[in-house]
Amino acid sequence: MNYRLWLHGAASRILLLAIAVLTFFVGPAAAFEAEDMLRRNTSIDGNGTPYRVLLPDSQQRAKPLPLIVFLNGSGQIGSDNEAQVTQNTGSLFANFLSPEHLARQPIFLVAPQSRTDRWNPDEIIEVVAKVRAEFDIDADRIYLTGLSTGGSAVWDTLKAYPDIFAAGVPISSGSAFEGLDRIVHIPLWIFHGINDHATDRRYGDGGGRFGPRWLVTALLDLGGHPGYTEYDDDGHNIWDRVYADERLFPWLIAQHRPHITPAQSVKTLQ
């Protein structure tokens, strides 16, 4: 028997076992750390809107870069300037903002934190203005995405400021019909789960916000070209699946303002 070979193999097996045990107890290395993001507030005294900024590498900032604005859901409201980038963001940072995607297109990302369960579009725009004042942002490539109440804020903010954003991605959310005519020109990719009981795909939340099926139908009737993906085996918490969709990042960064051509419809209503 080749004892040297056998010992080598045994040592390798022991090493692999040790790695497996450490991985089980410690967990895999995190793809993203919240502390990597700058901490900011719209007010000097800290009583404004808290927000975090993810920066591209310094050598990538030789020219203006796109800005993605991410809006948290109701489970992350507060003022700690932490929850909005540590909860429900795993796939956003690991998949959507993967190293491969960011190598293709470096971006800035800003994540404000809502202090209440209903976003104020004016506060979101104030955060965008602060980021634009501090960093070199491509004004024609500012994108808005959010989940749950943050998704509803995407609708509200686009309606209130229809000339600011190049595209919007609302997830698991609803909106009123009022103001849809102001955003017909904006490229949208809307995501929803067929079993979403928090926001019904047709009737919405019962509080004046209707679901995406009726909103998309209304936008189509107005001459819009919204993209719509509906998961037939999911409920409200679909954002990890959405941000893991390999089509989303390339589609988003391809959108520019002014919107010369209609957005491509990704999926039509069934």
Image: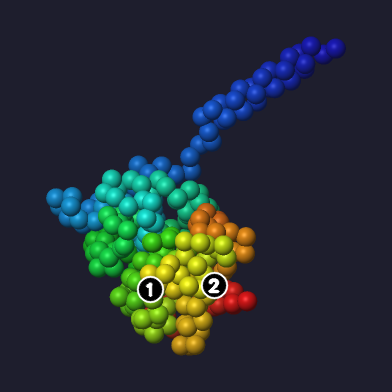
Q: For this view, does 138 lie left or right of residue 217? A: left
Figure quadrant of the C terminus? bottom right
Number of numbered labels in the structure image: 2
Q: Which residue is mark 2?
A: 228
Q: Residues within 10 Å of mark 1 (few under 14, many from 20)?
A: few
The circle drawn on residue 259 is none
Figure quadrant of the N terminus? top right
Disc 2 vs disc 1: which is toward the camera?
A: 1
Is 196 rendered above or below residue 31? below
> Which corner quadrant of the image does residue 146 belong to?
bottom left
Q: Residues within 10 Å of mark 2 (few under 14, many from 20)?
A: many
Image color mode? rainbow
55 or 212, which lies in front?
Answer: 212
Amino acid at dot 1: Gly
Question: Percent x, y for residue 115?
Answer: 27, 55
Measuring 17% from the left and 55% from the top, which residue is drawn there? 43
Is 41 rendered above or below residue 69? above
Is 25 rendered above or below residue 109? above
Extreme-left residue of the structure: 45
92 or 196, which lies in front?
Answer: 196
Measuring 41% from the left and 42% from the top, which residue is drawn there? 33
177 or 51, which lies in front?
Answer: 177
Amino acid at dot 2: Tyr
Q: Which residue is mark 1?
A: 208
Q: For this view, does 13 lie left or right of residue 91? A: right
Question: Percent x, y for residue 256?
Answer: 42, 74
Distance from Cα at disc 2 to Cα at disc 1: 21 Å
Measuring 34% from the left and 71% from the top, which residue is drawn there? 156
Measuring 47% from the left and 77% from the top, which residue is drawn there? 215
Question: Percent x, y for residue 192?
Answer: 52, 65
Disc 2, SS: strand
